[in-house]
Each structure stands twice: as structure tokens, then as C-alpha cells.
Amino acid sequence: MQTSVRDRVPGLILLLAAIVFSIFPLVSMLTAALQPQGTIPVGVSWPADPQWHNFVDAWKVADITPLLWSSIILVIGVVPVAALFATMAGYALGQLRVPGSGLLFLLFLFGLTLPREATIIPLYYQIRDMGLLNTRLGLILVLIAAFMPFAVFWMRAHFLTMPKELSEASAIDGATQWQAFTRIQIPLAVPAIASMCLLLFLWTWNTFLQAIVLIDDPSKRTMAGALQNFVGQYSTDVVLLNAGSLLIMAPTIIVFLFFQRHFIKAMIAGAVKG
Amino acid sequence: MSTLDSTLAGEVTGGSWIARRARSGSRGPRLSRGLSGWLFVLPALSVYAAFVLRPLLSTIQYAFYDWNGITAATPVGLGNFQRVLTDPLLLSSVGHSFFLMIFYTILPVIGGLMVAALIQEIRLWGLGTVARTTLFLPQIIPGAAAAIAWVWMFSSNGAVNQVLSAVGLDGQTRAWLGDFNFALTSVGVIGTWLGLGFCTILLMAGIGKIDVSIYEAARLDGAGFFRTFTSVTLPGLRQEIGVCVTVTLIAALASFDIVFMSTQGGPGTSTMVPGVLIYQLGFTESRIGLASALAIVLTALILAVILPIQRFFREE
């Protein structure tokens, strides 16, 4: 059955409304960011003479370059390690089914319902006692751990779909478990790992609470975390504030536009798989 | 918030895996192999234990003490919990997050359902990609940045007032986030904005999976739009609705980024939510015991809300 086009008009109108609603705040930011500096923009109005160089100024004022580096370093520190750990654990829980894997899985699953606020205060003191306050290493460790529940869950789901004969056959061939894992299982898991890495990248980049708690120096934080400082300094300069915020949003939006199909698929799969 | 979203989105499906395993009754393979397999879990388990489980236990421990983070802590028994359950500010913060559920959960799910039911397929005219991409944008940008966009939208000179004036509602313009009566609702609108696209896409993906012949049969039986909706679409989308509700409820209860960046809980305490209060108590007021007790209550609350919902939407 296909509903006729006419029957769909109300739905399409709703859908268009939802789309406009989703994008409207960003458009509003953009038009404000293009007004002449020092003026007070009003609502959404395309400027007669769009000041694109506002973005250049905001880049300098908000000191975007070190922020960009900082976020990239964090992503490089977090994503590969988290992906490796989770893939190994997912393999053990989903394919090897080590003794006690049901219990272990429940333990990880529990972490999924845990709000960040539940651990953030002791984390501050723990990281301080380790001497890692204000270092990226501290934040990286915390983020890897925070992503483990989802990542292990995700990789376990993948390995459950792999035939058991695969690891059994390689065992007969005399391959060690590690060889079987790196030479047979990982290559087959690449699509699952890649989608997971996209999500991990996004979450690392957008990390806010842990970044503002564990790192004082905004230039060592994530870009999202640095926003807090930027807003504190420029809350009255609407034009620059909007331009700077757009710059801070830009990297994830650009990556998203490139990989939007994969992103959406991964996020939906993460939600409904099983 | 997106972290939490998708993390929790994952959690939703976990239950069925466990159930399935339990049903099939599969056991681990030979023991020796199993033991060395433990080495594979070890790295993930160690970081998780060190930076999630251990601090969680510390939070529970702190909750029974009065501690300012510097001098020695004094045990206060259940005092902090008592405080959480009686102090008007702490209680109202929990109340606010329940109010936010209307905007974070109910509106996006209803909106998403309406769009999905009315359209069913959006592959037409290549609208699909554009629609999906734009609807998903709120999930991609950092919550903190979304808050800044909305602070500007809601400001005196912002687009919300501009639109109101344009339709002749000049009398209704105000600085929304600074208004005691409207600030919380305005924060709620931001939540609706975050969740609407996610729910719409998820529900549309779900409706695409319902067997077309069921709709065919319903139509042949003379079922109207509403009847089809209640007896085919809603049951068919049960799982997806469960995911949407779970993810957005947690977003409402554990909201931090948006409130922290847009209102800091103000004006007064009219938009204070537990997440922001935990931060303020713990890091600016140095009342660590009380902040920890609130964190524990929040966690318990999330579990208490989510687990029954999980069970309900999992039933077949």
C-alpha cells in the first residue's frame, strides 16, 4: 500500500515544520554572526553587507587554533584506545563467552544508565590525587572509561552475530587466541568498529561536563568545554559570540555532513539493535 | 547530551540480548580457553572499574559525610539524604526535571509519531536525505553550543520575539530565559528541539519496517486513519517508542549542558535541575556530601523511571 500524495500533505507540512524548527536556531546564529561588529542585531535578518571576516576575527579572538588541536589530541587519545579495549571485551563476551560473561555484561550495562553527575565529584578528587588535574591525560582516561559501557555493548552485539565456528576453526588450525582475534576477527569487525569510532569521536568532541571540571585551562579542553570561557568573556558582543560559537560547532557539523548516512545509521542502530 | 542519548539508546536493547541468551541457555566453551579469554576483557574492565565504578562507590561513601573537600569529613549518617528529600531547593530541582519531561519526551515522541504516521515513507523526491540530515543536526552539535544558539533566540532582540511581533503578538515579547514564569518552559523548548528530530527519524525508520500487508489488510477491513494508527502503527512501533521515551527521559532527568550554559539554573532557582545543582554544590559551594547524596538520588530516580518503562516496552 502506498498512501496517495494528497494524504501525505499534512504529514509533509509537519515534517517541513520540524525541519525548519531544527535548523532555525542555526540560521538565526548565522545571520547574527554576519552583522557589522559592534551593532546589536535583531532576530533573523540577512545583513545588507554580510561581514564574513567576522569569522576570521572570531577565530583570533576565541583562539580557535589551539582549541582545535586540543580537541584533536583528545580524540586521538580516546578513540583508538577505547575502540581497541571495547573490541577485545566485546570479542570475549560475545564470541568466546568467557565464564561469567553474563555477569560482566550486566556490570557494563549498568554503566549505561549512570548519569555523568553520579561520578563527577569523586573523579575530580581521584584525578587530582593522581596528579592529572589540568592534563589531557586525565580527561582521556575518564572519557575512555565513560565510553566503555556503550562501546563494549556495541562490539559484543557485533560478535554475537559472528558464527562461532570461526574462532573454533582457527583454534583447530593452531592459531593462538590473539592471532585469531587480530587476523580474523578484527578485519571482519571493521564496519562495526568504524561506526563506533564515529560515535566516539562525536562524544569526545562534544564532552562538556568532564572537560570543565577536570581542566581549568580552556585551551586544553574540548572545543565544547572552551565555549564556557568564551561566553564568559564575550557575552555582550552578540556578533562575535555567535560567530565564535558557529566556528566551535563547525568541525562536528562538517564531519557529520560527510558521514551523515553512517552517523545516522550508527545512532539508530545503537538505539534499536537487538 | 548526545553521549548520554546514544549510550542509553544502547542500553535499551541490552535486555533482549540477555533474555535471548538466557533462553537459549548457551554456556561458555572450554574452561581453559575461557580463562585466557578473560585477558581480553581485562583492559576494558580495569578502566571501567577505575574511572566509573570506583568513583561511583566514592559518591555513595561521600553521601554519608559532611565534607568541604579540604578539612576532615564528619559522618552524618542519612542526614544528607534527609536534606535532599526535604530541602525545597533540592526538591524543586527534581520537580523541574519532571516538568521538563513534557518538553523533552512527550512533545518529541508525539510529534515524531504524527510525522511518521502521516508520511510513512520519505524516500520520495530525494527529500529523505535533506530531511534526515537537518533533523539530526541538533544531535550532532555540542549541547553547550546549542544552548548559546537558543540564548540568542530567546533574548530580547532574538528571533522568538521577532516572530511574535511579526504575527501581532507584540505584547507577549520578553526576555524569555530571564523571566521567572517562562524560563523553565523556554529551557523545555530547547529540549524539544534536541529530541524532536531524533524521535522523528527513529520512528520513521521503524514504521518502514512494519509489514505493508498489515496496512493493506487494515484498509480492506475499512479501518480509518485513526483506527489504523492505534491498532497497526502504535503496536508496530512499540520498541522504537520505548527507545525514544528512554533516551529522552534520561536527557530530561540528567540535563546539564543546556541548563548550565543557558540559565545556570536562574533566574533565581526557577530553572535549577539536579545536574547543575550537583555541580554547584560540589564545585562552587564545596558541600560534597550533599552534592553526592543528590547524585545518588538522581541515579536511583533514573533507574526507577527507566526500568519499568523498559519492561513495559519490551513486553511482547
Image (tube, rainbow, N blue to C red):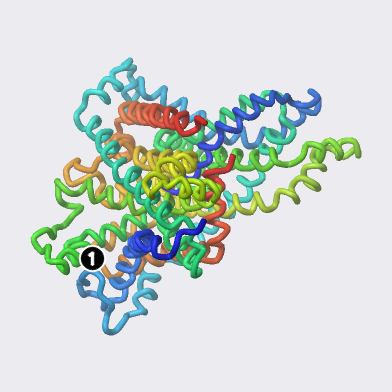
Density class for disc 1 (Cα within 10 Å; few <14, some 14-19, many ≥20) is many
**Could you tell me residue A84's position as x and y percent?**
66, 45
- Image position of A47 with respect to B301: above or below: below
Q: Residue at x 25, y 40 (%)?
A: B272
Q: Which secondary structure, mark 1?
A: helix
Q: Residue at x 61, y 45 (%)?
A: A82
Q: Residue at x 45, y 36 (%)?
A: A123
- Image position of B131 with respect to B40: above or below: below
Residue sticking out furthest to the bottom:
A49
Q: Quadrant of residue A9?
A: bottom left
* Horizontal arrangement in the rendering, residue A115 relative to residue A181 (left or right): left
**Could you tell me residue B178's position as x and y percent?**
17, 52
Of A4 and B301, which appears nearest the observer?
A4
The three-letter code of the residue at mark 1 reads Ala
* Horizontal arrangement in the rendering, residue A176 relative to residue B223 (left or right): right
Residue sticking out furthest to the left:
B171
Can the viewer see residue A133 in this picture? no
**Please, which chain is the residue tagged with disc 1 on?**
B
Can the viewer see residue A56 in this picture? yes
Q: Quadrant of residue B151?
A: bottom left
- Image position of A184 with respect to A118: above or below: below
Q: Residue at x 25, y 75 (%)?
A: A45
- Disc 1 marks which residue? B159
Residue sticking out furthest to the right:
A173
* Horizontal arrangement in the rendering, residue B112 relative to residue A44 (left or right): right
* Horizontal arrangement in the rendering, residue B179 relative to residue B46 (left or right): left
Of A248 and A233, which appears nearest the observer?
A248
**Could you tell me residue B228's position as x and y percent?**
42, 46
**Could you tell me residue A146's position as x and y percent?**
52, 40
